[in-house]
Amino acid sequence: MIKLRKPIKRKDNFFVYIIQCKDGTYYTGYTNNLHRRLEQHNSGKGGAKYTKWKGFEKLVYKKKHKYFKNALNEERKIKQLRRKQKIDLIKVFARTKRKYQSPENGK
């Protein structure tokens, strides 16, 4: 009897994210549960080997996608960027995030 894997969700909320590690390097990934994935990276259990050894410092970029394939494609594009290009992407994200935060409650 052949066991079939659980089918991958193709339409949901998927996130592409960049983590800054304690040594200043960046790790890029995608997930359908950002909170759980960040906890895995932070604890060193279930996260990527890279972040286990480099140490999780903070989330510096995230982008939500409706489709799995779009998130996967963006992750691939980001991973091909040079470090300076990643830093520029993170700066744009930070400026955009600040622009839309409410001064009263910080959201």
Image (cartoon, rainbow, N blue to C red):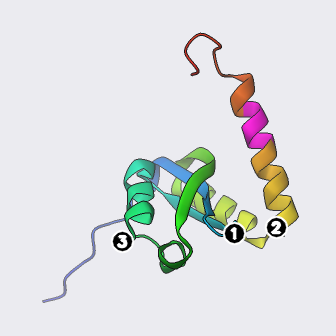
- Residue 103, image x and y in percent? 65, 13
Q: Which residues are magenta?
A: 92-96
Distance from Cα at disc 3 to Cα at disc 2: 26 Å
Q: Count the numbered circles shown.
A: 3
In the orientation shown, which residue stands out farthest toward the bottom? 1
Q: Amino acid at mark 3?
A: Gly
Vertical order, 34 against 83 (above or below) = above
For mark 2, give the secondary structure: helix
Q: Are marks 1 and 3 in contact (CB under 8 Å)?
A: no
Mark 2 lies on residue:
83
Residue neighbourhood size for the residue with mark 2, other residues' Cα within 10 Å, grouped as few (<14), some (14–19), many (≥20): few
Q: Which is more N-terminal, label 3 or label 1?
A: 1
Foreground residue among 49 and 66:
49
Q: Which mark is residue 46?
A: 3
Residue 72, quarter of picture? bottom right
Residue at horizontal 71 percent and vertical 28 percent from the top: 98
Vertical order, 39 against 55 (above or below) = above
